[in-house]
Image: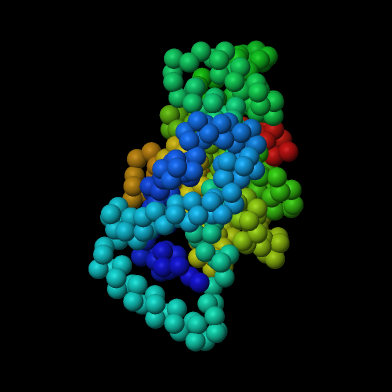
Amino acid sequence: MLTFPTYLLRIGRVPPLAMAAAIVAQRQARPTLGELAVAKGKLTRAVIDKLVQQQRRRRVKIGQVAVDSGALTRPELESLLDEQASLEPNLVDILVLQGALTRDVAEGEHERYLELERERELENGRSATHARDSFACSVARLSLLKPFSNAVREALTLLSNSDTAPAKVAAVLAADPSITVATLRIANSAMYRRGAPCDSLKDAVVRLGAGTIRDIITGISLLGAFTESDRVANATRQHLAGAAAIARILAGAVAPRLSNVAFLAGLTHDIGKLLLLQSGEFSYDTQSREVLEAGSRVHVLENDALGYDHAILGGLALGIWELPRIVADAVGFHHEPIRAHVAGGDIAQLTSLVVLASELEHHQSLSPHFTSLVERELEAHPEAEQLGLRPNAVEEIWVELVQARAEMAALLAR
């Protein structure tokens, strides 16, 4: 059955990012399972602390740990989960409270929604909308995906404090060998390398600085959370890696202060595709190679099938995973950049960088040369105009863009 919030999203009454913010607020407002268990006298705080330690080692839900350890029975867990769900505030109430919707509009649309659902049930004998078409279903899947290892989470916490010693950050990250190797590769890439190569993670942290290291390990972790290796998944990783490199260099030319977040936004702008691939909610295999390679119509097909596209889903995911708001917004806006321009400021520039980097990456995947087609498109491109990037300026750094794209794809898309 099509839920009422999803209906509001599909008819355009609620902007996608406003819906995402409301969903996050709804989840944050409910009590945790541990809090409920303590309040109900099912578990003590000491037991909860032990269960949390086990959960971190096993990387499963705490409820499962509680049942496996005998701290809770399955019926007790299900009862607590039901109560937890019942304590979530109504999503429409949150939308009204946040100013994304008025009460009068909500009530009027609810009447129309009920009438539409009655018509659908009469026509089909059942709800015509499958659970896989539900935006809320995707949100539920997001909450199950934990892209950051314990080492990365601890390192990100340390990096938020400017007084933390680089050696301490390096020592924590060393517990995650894959992150260590990938970080050193990127730190020693032409795009980041300055002077002699970094021989250790500590050298990389010192040389690149906390902000750059934070964005690098965040991006690596996010890509590493998806293990699909079919044609579409591999092409998506290649595109993300290349777009990240291009976005960073373009930012250096027009807005150097955005260079790091441009890299991270480029690296994650199509992460919604990987989410849809993992969940199986949208079949990319049925789309033509031309559509997939061009990239310009995929989001339209997603929206037709699901009522939302990978940009909206990706922006929501990054918000849930607590990435910088500007990055989540740029990802969510990159198929509707006009909305970013309305917001203005850094978000408008970052979104333009992501859009332009994505399109230039597609061009370079077809030809490494600065062609007349690229020149004509840049001349008329609204995002290039927004950034003040003339075709001759892009041509001057074209070779650097090509080399950085190829190097980053080789480092990250493996």
Q: Taking 12 as reference, is 409 above or below it?
A: above
What residue appears at the point 41 percent right and 64 percent down from the top-left corner?
5
Determine the residue positioned at 54% across, 50% down: 77
* 244 horizontally vs 113: left or right: right
Quarter of the image for the C terminus: give it.
top right
The residue at 66%/26% (across/down) is 176
Residue 92, picture quadrant = bottom left
Q: In this figure, what is the number of numbered marks?
A: 0
> Does the rendering let one see residue 1?
yes
Figure check: 113 above or below 348: below
Quarter residue 183 falls in = top right
Q: Position of residue 277 (x, y in %)?
A: 65, 55
Residue 299 drawn at (x, y percent): 55, 60
Residue 116, image quadrant: bottom left
The picture places residue 66, in percent across and down from the top left corner, at 58, 42
> Which residue shows up at 70% across the image and 66% down it?
286
Residue 333 position, x and y percent, is 45, 51
Is 261 left, or right, of 109 in this rendering? right
Of residue 177 and residue 356, the one placed in the foreground of this image is 177
Looking at the image, can residue 350 be seen? no
Nearer the observer, 66 or 25: 66
Is residue 394 depicted above or below 160 in this figure? below
Q: Is residue 398 above or below residue 287?
A: above
Kindly give the residue lying farthest to the bottom in the view shown: 122
Q: 280 or 93, which lies in front?
A: 93
**Colouring style:** rainbow
